[in-house]
Image (cartoon, rainbow, N blue to C red):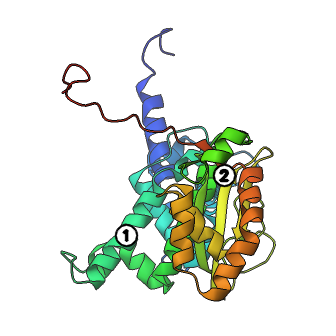
Amino acid sequence: MSPRGGDPPGWLRELQRDFSAVLRAPLDSGSGTFRERQERYPERLVAQLKSGPGSLAPAERLALYHRQYWMRLFTALQTGFPRASRAVGYWHFNHLAALHLAARPPQHVDIDEATRGFAARLGGALQRLDEAERGRGSKPPAHEDEWCRRIELSRAPRAMVRQALRMDEAERHAYESPFEGLWRPTPAELGKLAEGRLRFAVSCTLTHEDWDLARFSRLTGVDRDEGAPGAVRRHLSRRCWVFARSATGTATTCVDPLFARLLRRCRELPFGQALAAVEHGCTAAEAARLRAKLQGWILLALASGWWTGLEAEPRAQESPTDGPSRT
């Protein structure tokens, strides 16, 4: 044994290195299923594993551990991205997960940390495919980029994959954000509402979907007992959703597309200007619906904690004679 506080013995370092290399090696998918390749295990590692009467052979025990480890990683990525995994299909998604894990091997005791960075890589691949389609790519991504090639092999509409990824990220963001409480406007704040700029909760994200994606939630696990997934259905019309942190957890709320337009404009303009901009683009029927529903929508936003107050008014710009110059 090594002295107390000293370096571990060489045989232990070698054992740990070989064992880590085996675990990190991706499962082989050449047979049409993800499986381990026992013949690739280091002989010196297998030789150090002992097996008792009636137990599996050392290589088989190592293979079982290897396979279960990767199944846990795949499950963590699928749970973290339930809509994206549905959109591309689990077979192709697991290939993308393996590419991500090869580039960023897990190094944290919390297995959910293995999902960090996946969204950026998948989003980047979707962007490269779009650029190649527009003739801006520097090389054919379907042949030279493993991420792009796997997305194309899935035959999933890129718009659907992009929407699925945005919804997964919106749900994660809401889950990890704090609940900021409910804003109860004072009479003075209500008087400033028309000219005021609304402050949105940090957890609040507006998304839309053309396919039936929202119900596949990482929080509810609604898709776990449905057996083999079928094709994701396309809606007859677009649906809009707000993801946000609530007092009891993470909330997903379907909102009227007209209200979604107002919420989007409120991010850019004071409330009165945002409302006028939406009204300007309305048909007669939409304008009537806007007037009839507006008060209820405002109450919904307040009760849900999507708005947390009014932005502070910017100070008037100082004139050259107001004080010393600033750089």
The residue singled out by tag 2 in the image is 306
Q: Amino acid at mark 2?
A: Trp
Place residue 36 in its image quadrant: bottom right
Query: In screen coordinates, is 57 left or right of 215?
Result: left
Instruction: Check contact, mark 1 vs mark 2: CB within 8 A.
Output: no
Place residue 252 in its image quadrant: bottom right
Mark 1 / mark 2, whichever is N-terminal: 1
Note whether 95 is above or below 101 in the view shown. Answer: below
Residue 181 visible, this angle = yes
Nearer the viewer's eye, disc 1 or disc 2? 2
Q: Circle 1 — which element? A: helix
Q: Quadrant of the C terminus?
A: top left
Q: Residue at (50%, 50%) from the top-left corner? A: 116
Q: Circle 2 — which element? A: loop
Q: CA distance from mark 1 to mark 2?
A: 32 Å
In the image shown, does 316 or 41 lie closer to the viewer? 316
Q: Residue at (81%, 46%) from the top-left corner? A: 248
The residue singled out by tag 1 in the image is 125
Q: How many discs mark residues in the rendered view?
A: 2
Q: Amino acid at mark 1?
A: Ala
On the image, the x and y values in percent for residue 191 come to 65, 46
Residue 180 visible, this angle = no
Q: Residue at (74%, 48%) from the top-left corner? A: 246
